[in-house]
Image: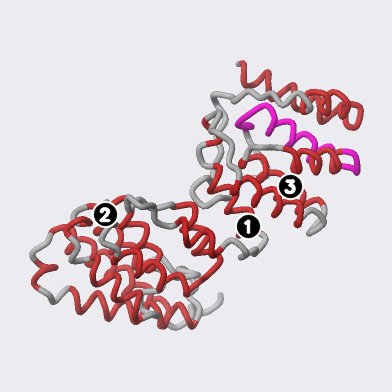
């Protein structure tokens, strides 16, 4: 009931149009916020932030959404002002995307500058929405195809303890493409990296290129024999040979079909090896991937159905 009332108030602001702008401006200037219990923010893992909410995660994000829907030059200017002053990564990410929709590339430089500034000068986490700030900020750079932070992200990839910076890895994946394989292969070999929580994302980065890149295949071959990844982690990785790196699973492109064929040959080879046959998790993973890859090839080779 409370959430319905809150949503009604946001709708009332939108209905008021430009008459609501002074009140919204006054509240935003107070730099106060309130997170709603029912608010859900998707995209934190890859740094993407939706620009349209069924339920806003916070009061400020709800007001940003109201400004987006009110539209006009004043609302755009208010959103741009907050982009330059906010110290929250989630807000930079949201505002960057909204302003790009409103005025393509007009606020690109400001968004990139805001993201870089907060990455270099992070603010202490203040609320639940702030825990993925670095994902959001790197996501802004990737969103605008800005690769200027690649060297910085490479230096942040592994901590001295061997822990993995997933936000930096995700940015490197999106900025470097296939070139990231060499980087993750080197990191996977680092003796400091012993935790499965660090190893699994590195292998998954290489997984997208298994069947097209020899170094990615080497990383995969090491992973299936790695005691640290045995059980569910390696089964999930092996099963995902049927999707990671394949652009269109339902209607594969010629490049997809080549990748699928290479992976099907790979699963066939592994299913003949004793260490796979004697390992339940590996066997289940390879059987599942093998079945799906075979089905993809069969569907692609089947003659088109006649039109009625």
Is residue 170 shown left or right of residue 28? left
Mark 2–mark 1 distance (CA, rounded to whole Å) = 30 Å
Verify whether residue 21 appears in magenta: no
Residues marked 1 and 3 touching at CB (< 8 Å):
no
Q: Position of residue 269 (x, y in %)?
A: 20, 79
Query: Which quadrant is the N terminus positioned in?
Result: top right
Of pointers 2 and 1, the one earlier in the residue sequence: 1
How far across and down, in percent of the image, does residue 127 sit?
54, 29
Residue 184 badge:
none
Residue at x 56%, y 38% (from the top left corner): 41
Per the image, the residue denoted by label 3 is 98
Which type of secondary structure does the marked residue at label 1 adopt?
A: helix
Residue 68 colored in magenta in the image:
yes
Looking at the picture, does residue 119 appear above or below residue 152?
A: above
Q: Residue at x 32, y 68 (%)?
A: 292
User: Which region of the structure is painted magenta?
Assistant: 55-74
- Badge 3: how crowded within 10 Å, few (<14), some, or many (20+)? many
Q: Which mark is residue 233?
A: 2
Secondary structure of the residue carrying tag 3 is helix
Numbered circle sitting on residue 141? 1
């Amino acid at each position: 009931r409370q959430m319905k009332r809150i949503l009604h108030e946001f709708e009332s602001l939108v209905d008021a149009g430009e008459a609501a702008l002074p009140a919204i401006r006054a509240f935003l200037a107070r730099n106060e916020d309130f997170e709603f219990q029912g608010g859900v923010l998707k995209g934190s893992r890859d740094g993407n932030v939706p620009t349209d909410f069924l339920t806003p995660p916070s009061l400020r994000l709800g007001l940003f959404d109201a400004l987006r829907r009110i539209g006009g030059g004043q609302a755009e200017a208010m959103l741009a002002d907050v982009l330059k002053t906010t110290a929250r990564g989630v807000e930079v990410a949201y505002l960057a995307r909204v302003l790009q929709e409103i005025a393509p590339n007009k606020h690109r430089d400001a968004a990139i500058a805001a993201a870089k500034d907060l990455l270099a000068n992070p603010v202490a986490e203040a609320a639940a929405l702030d825990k993925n700030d670095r994902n959001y900020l790197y996501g802004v750079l990737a969103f605008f195809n800005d690769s200027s932070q690649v060297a910085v992200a490479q230096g942040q990839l592994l901590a001295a303890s061997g822990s993995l910076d997933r936000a930096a890895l995700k940015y490197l994946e999106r900025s470097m493409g296939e070139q990231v394989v060499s980087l993750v292969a080197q990191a996977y070999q680092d003796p400091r990296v012993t935790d499965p929580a660090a190893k699994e994302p590195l292998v998954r980065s290489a997984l997208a290129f298994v069947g097209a890149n020899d170094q990615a295949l080497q990383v995969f071959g090491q992973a299936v024999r790695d005691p640290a990844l045995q059980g569910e982690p390696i089964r999930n990785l092996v099963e995902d040979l049927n999707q990671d790196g394949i652009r269109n699973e339902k209607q594969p492109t010629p490049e997809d079909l080549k990748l699928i064929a290479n992976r099907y040959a790979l699963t066939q080879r592994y299913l003949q090896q004793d260490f796979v046959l004697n390992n339940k998790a590996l066997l289940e993973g390879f059987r599942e991937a093998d079945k799906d890859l075979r089905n993809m090839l069969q569907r692609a080779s089947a003659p088109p159905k006649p039109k009625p």
